Image: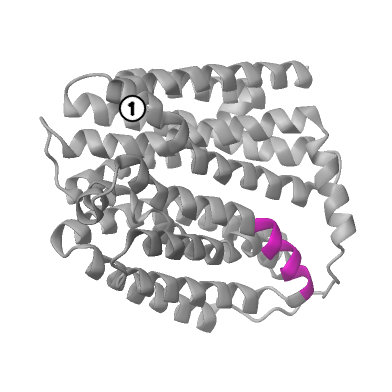
Amino acid sequence: MMIFSNIYITQPLLPTLVNDFSITKLEANWSLTITTFTLALSLLVYGALSDALGRKHLMFYSMISTVLATLALSIVTDYSHFLLLRAIQGFCLGGLPAIAIAYMSDEFSKKALLAAVGFYIAANTLGGIGGRLAGGYFGGWLGLEDTFQIMAMWSLVIVAAFWWLLPASTQFTRQPVNLKKMLRAIQGHLSNPVLIIAYLIGSLNFMIFMNQYSYITFVLADLPYSLPPFWIGLLFLTYLSGTLASTVSGYIAGRFSQSRAMMLGIVIFMIGTLTTLQDSLIGIVSGFFINAFGFFLCHSQLSSWVSRYAPQNRATASALYLVFYYLGASVGGLYLNPFWEWHEWIGVVTGSIIVLGVTLTGCWFLARHEE
């Protein structure tokens, strides 16, 4: 929860950043883009280091570094310094996502592991919602400085609980970093056209999904809605339909196939995107509920599909999926900005449908591979 709340705390604050720093909407969106970009780059680094240095201590130090970066964000007055700190924060944040499941696989029984991973994935979603709600509420009430101070203090409490409650590693076996072996595994996955298609589907879907939320904040902050940050933050409760989608995705894949379940998710995503073109606030919110269901239905199936169809080095294959996933989020603002400049939200919807048509085609290729 702590990791994902720190990542997404700035998303409902994008209109506030525009006003406080006198920047453009695209520049404001960089506050999220740069964090997800450095997070993506850090994942493979932390994974390799944890095999050599251990799990718990590395997670702890990355989280402490995150707290310091968040606290520093509360005192900056220059936007370039703000972005630099968000970049550092993103790299620090990658420690736990890269290592946590490896730690649990080492230490927990198979039955406990299944329960723990379920809680862990649920907390990812809740952390994303909580960070956005906190950003919207405290940002509208107290301003940027106090918002980051509160997030830093809350994060510090979580880190203290993490250190106190998490058992020390007892099953961990230190392994030297084998750079050549890791690079061979990465090269093998990147030369596999089927895996590349899967990586690009996940990357492009998340590129659209996350950045739609960024651009809709400007729509809701402007006339005729004129919503304050707190009410904009409430929009992110629509993620809860994604939690439901993840829960039922196994049942849906059992009735069809994983690739066809992905295709269904993308079609639902497209329907939700078109639904947001309504002028009413209820219509926009309904569209985002539909979007979240469709996106997470596809994402939950795609992430497991990668692990299932990677011929070897499946942990590295899954790590690469996450790298592509977060890199997609990083470039989405740049892709959608010309569409926004062209026709604002109608333009964003147009750009979204184009990309979703591409990912739907990609899923069709994966379906042929399954047959």
Q: Would you say the magenta stretch is mainly helix, strand or loop?
A: helix
Q: Residue 245: tell me if it is visible.
A: no
Magenta extent? 43-52
Q: Is residue 370 left or right of residue 227?
A: right
Residue at x-position 51% and y-position 21%: 356
- Measured from the top left, where is residue 247 in percent x and y? 50, 39
Residue 226 belongs to the span the image colors magenta: no
Name the quarter where the N terminus is drawn: bottom left
Residue pictured at 82% horizontal, 75% vertical: 174
The residue that mark 1 highlights is 340
Q: Please state which of residues 162 and 143 is positioned toward the viewer in this rendering.
A: 143
Between residue 76 and residue 361, name the one nearer to us: 76
Q: Position of residue 52 (x, y in %)?
A: 79, 73
Give residue 344's position: percent from left, percent from top: 28, 25
Task: Specify the quadrant of the image occupied by residue 302.
Answer: top right
- Whether residue 122 sits left or right of residue 312 in the image: it is left
Q: Residue at x 75, y 33 (%)?
A: 195
The answer to which image quadrant residue 352 occupies is: top left
Q: Give how far across and how far down residue 315 sits, in percent.
A: 76, 51
Q: Is residue 327 above or below residue 257?
A: below
Give the side of residue 167 with respect to residue 338, left or right.
right
Image quarter hosting the C terminus: top right
One can see residue 261 in this view: yes
Q: Secondary structure at mark 1?
A: helix
In the image, residue 241 sits, relative to residue 104, either above or below, namely above
Residue kind at label 1, given as amino acid type: Trp
What residue sits 83% from the left and 34% below the top? 191
| 36, 341: nearer the viewer | 341
